Amino acid sequence: MKKVFGILLVALLFVGCKQKINPADVAKINGYWEIEKVILENGEEKQYGMNESFDYFKIDKNNSGIRKKVMPQLDGTFLVNDTFENVKIRFTDDQTFLDYSTPYMKWSEEILVLTDKELVVLNAEKKEYHYKKTGPINLDNYGKKTK
């Protein structure tokens, strides 16, 4: 009986600690995100070092926008193409979702964490993607900030 009580207590702590994403938080998603790691359903982690591409989000006040893959260059610019996904933010009860669509398919990811520096999403395959906020890389101007 003590084990059951302990398990219930731990489960309640996890449920109680889940971040509630508010509509005001949506603006935090705008910008460049670099993947740090993926946690698989079985708990296995895949760490990412240097990434060749970042995810760029641009969401407007109507909770819709785009996600695009961009490739940072050493001079602070990004290589981009015309490929993107339409994104809508959907709020349900205590959950928040990114609903993606292209002419070929639709899918959703649940936002688990969204702060100024961290984004964690869970997809349908129960893979948890951990991102960190990033920006342009600039090695040409001796450390001067890129605009």
Image (tube, rainbow, N blue to C red):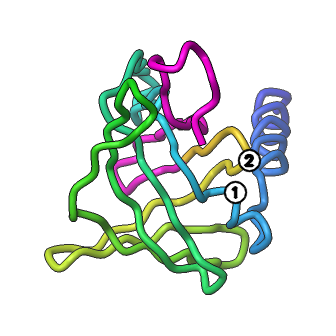
State the image coordinates of residue 76 (x, y, percent, origin top left): 45, 33
The amino acid at mark 1 is: Lys
- Residue at the disc numbered 2: 115
Q: Hey, which quadrant is residue 90 in on the image?
A: bottom right
> Residue visible at 53% across and 60% down?
110
> Residue visible at 56% across and 71% down?
59
Would residue 53 appear left or right of 139 to someone viewing this image? Answer: left
Say which of 117 and 7 sits in front.
Answer: 117
> Residue visible at 75% across and 34% down?
7
Mark 1: give few (<14), some (14-19) or many (20+) Cα within 10 Å.
Answer: some
Would residue 136 appear left or right of 111 to someone viewing this image? Answer: left
- Residue at the disc numbered 1: 28
Residues shaded magenta: 121-147
User: Which label sits in the foreground, 1 or 2?
Assistant: 1
Q: Hey, which quadrant is residue 8 in on the image?
A: top right
Q: Main secondary structure of the magenta part?
A: loop
Mark 2: give few (<14), some (14-19) or many (20+) Cα within 10 Å.
Answer: some
Say which of 84 and 13 sits in front.
Answer: 84
Q: Pointer 1 and pointer 2: residues touching (CB < 8 Å)? A: yes
Tell me the element at label 2. loop
State the image coordinates of residue 132 (x, y, percent, origin top left): 58, 34
User: In which quadrant of the rendered image does the N terminus lie?
Assistant: top right
User: In which quadrant of the rendered image does the C terminus lie?
Assistant: top right
Could you say which disc has been placed on residue 113 in the image? Answer: none
State the image coordinates of residue 88 (x, y, percent, origin top left): 49, 77
Residue 30 colored in magenta in the image: no
Q: Earlier in the sequence, mark 1 or mark 2?
A: 1
Q: Is residue 63 above or below residue 140?
A: below
Say which of 43 and 136 sits in front.
Answer: 136
